[in-house]
Image: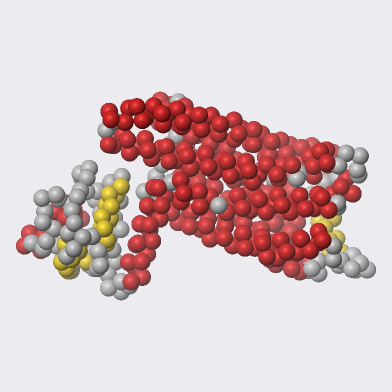
Amino acid sequence: MSDIEEFERVVFTFINPCICIFGIICNIFNLLVLTRKRLHESPYSYLTGLAVADLSTLTLTFIHGTFSRASDDTSYEWKVFDVKVYFPLANMTSTTGIFITVVLTLERFIFVRYPLHAKDICTKTIAQRAIIITYLVACLINIPLFFCMDVENKPNSTVKYQYASTAFEQSSIYHGITWFHVTTIQLIPIFILGILNICLIIIVWRAQTRRESLKPKMSSSTEYQTRDQKRLTVTLISIVILFLICFTPSVIANRHIARGIFGKGESYNNFVGSTFFRALAIVSNILVNINQSLNFILYCVFNQKFVKTMKHMVQQWRYIILHKGRGTPLKSLSRVKGSSVSFTQFSSLYIDRTPSNPKNLDKIMADCTSEKSPMMKTKQQEELLPKGAEEKVEDGPVEYEQDEGVYTINGAEAQIATTPQ
């Protein structure tokens, strides 16, 4: 076994599956968090679509690397899976992720550069439509990949089944399609993302400088909204930087581009089969998989709202697991009015599955979050409890969080939360 073959074996047997498993878990968490109602802004819709695309690509890559390559060219079914399922579908989902990143970057640029037009353009409805169109376009331009490869049976060879080029792949039409793909899927996106990302970095830096001078004059609500939008923009900048770092080598590793740069005077077949090109292709594939796996880490590092939403989700799961069969926490009540609440004690409410009156629950929550309330059990609170509810007094400080109209009270026996309607 040559060195490059040993390198391929190690990468596809150990390294790539580990990256894919990590990325699949991270993207599942992305979907669970990004689909929460708290993250209702349009950029989170794009990030949800990106997570679906990355999850699909990593799943297909894991199946290909773990099962198909393990068949050692003896399984006709797995070879068919590679040429008719993995190769075209993985390119479709990967292309979708690239296009969504470009559209999201363009949306963020419009939002920070032309804020007066952003209210009409940067909406969740437009984001959802753009995602659907992006998926359709990505699928459409990759349809030719279903017809460019086939499986060939060679009974007298040491390799029983192997890939074979079709007449369509060798035609001038497919040659033109290949360069169209290189231009639209690789070169143009990298150029657009590079330019827009530089512009976003400059705009964010200037806005931060201006905000520091105006900070004493800004209201708390305006400051919060500005800070939240800045987090979104910084998160996107980090996503694009990671994308450019990990995706650029795959452009260089394109067979035609790589041969033009590194294989001048060498025949196509000799260059593609060379050790240098095979190593370049392996490294570029690893970087692409890393890019599709690390967005979750970037969200946790740069987006505080994403982290808070994830913590809130995990707390709800924890409560349901610990109190299974004893009742369920209220996931949604009517919004409690008021901008801020401060207290150290509260009367912990344990609500069972008995139907209750939302208006009474509003009053309970208003009493619990009142600054004048001693946060102890009172006759009035007993009367306001819905039928079937129990009340238990908890002494001592409790953990309380208020963020964008979402109130979370964590007690030993109950969790009461309100989410925006």
Camera-nearest residue between 417 and 283: 283
Residue drawn at (71%, 61%) of the image: 11
- Specify the quadrant of the image occupied by residue 56: bottom right
Look at the image and tell me whether residue 418 can be seen. no
Give x and y (percent) for residue 6: 79, 63
Judge left or right: residue 187 versus residue 223.
Answer: right
Look at the image and tell me whether residue 378 can be seen. yes
Quarter holding the N terminus is bottom right
Judge left or right: residue 264 versus residue 339.
Answer: right
In this picture, is 228 found above or below 157?
Answer: above
Residue drawn at (76%, 61%) of the image: 7
In this picture, is 30 found above or below 106?
Answer: below
Colour scheme: secondary structure
Give x and y (percent) for residue 336: 22, 48
Please, which residue is most extreme toward the left here? Answer: 379
Judge left or right: residue 243 versus residue 31.
Answer: right
Give x and y (percent) for residue 150: 81, 56
Residue drawn at (85%, 62%) of the image: 2
Give x and y (percent) for residue 386: 16, 63
Please, which residue is most extreme toward the bottom here? Answer: 325
